[in-house]
Image (cartoon, rainbow, N blue to C red):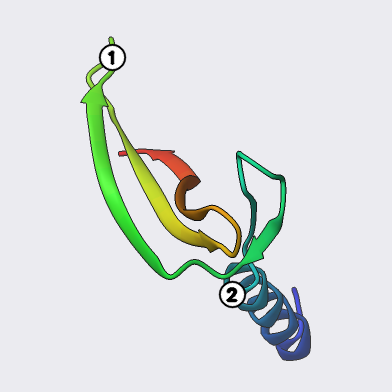
Amino acid sequence: MYGKFFIEYTLNMVTNMEENILAKCPKCGTEVANPRKKWKMAGRPDRTGKKTELTIGLFDCPKHGAFRKVLEKRKI
């Protein structure tokens, strides 16, 4: 249904969106791009028994130091 160009274009957009992550410093509001580190963490199960997988990023504010931000949440 979709051409090869459309699929490649969509994949490139998704890849580029993942690379350009912006987070605001909670203290001063400065926008910081690209986390220093990313990791995944599983949370506690909810009432239905599904866990939430969090993707967390560690960002460095030039004025106030490091802070964390949840980048993605999904049920597993």
Q: Amino acid at mark 1?
A: Thr
Q: Image point 72% across, 46% down: which residue?
A: 29
Whether 28 is drawn above or below 47: the answer is below
Q: Nearer the viewer, mark 1 or mark 2?
A: 2
**In the rendered image of this protein, does residue 1 appear above or below residue 67?**
below
Residue displayed at 56% across by 70% down: 34
Instruction: Give whichever of 59, 42 is nearer the camera.
Output: 59
SS at circle 1:
loop
Along the viewing direction, whichever of 35 and 7 lies nearer the viewer: 35
* Residue hosting label 2: 19
In the image, which disc is placed on residue 35? none
Residue assigned mark 1: 48
- Horizontal arrangement in the rendering, residue 52 relative to residue 64 (left or right): left
Residue 57 percent location from the top left of the image: 44, 56
Q: In what quadrant of the picture does the N terminus appear?
A: bottom right
Q: CA distance from mark 1 to mark 2?
A: 33 Å
> Mark 1 Cα within 10 Å, few/some/many (few <14, many 20+)?
few
Q: Is residue 74 depicted above or below 15 in this figure?
A: above
Residue 16 drawn at (x, y percent)? 66, 77
- Coordinates of residue 22 in the picture (x, y in percent): 66, 60
- Identified at 42% across, 58% down, the residue is 58
- In this orientation, which residue lies closer to the viewer: 29 or 5? 29
For label 2, the crowd category at 10 Å Cα-Cα, with few meaning under 14, some 14 to 19 and many 20 or more, is few
Q: Where does the image place residue 63, in percent across and percent down from the top left?
A: 60, 58
Q: Residue sitting at 58 percent across and 68 percent down?
A: 18
Q: Secondary structure at mark 2?
A: helix
The amino acid on which the numbered mark 2 sits, given as a three-letter code, is: Glu
Of the pair 7 and 51, the residue shown nearer to us? 51
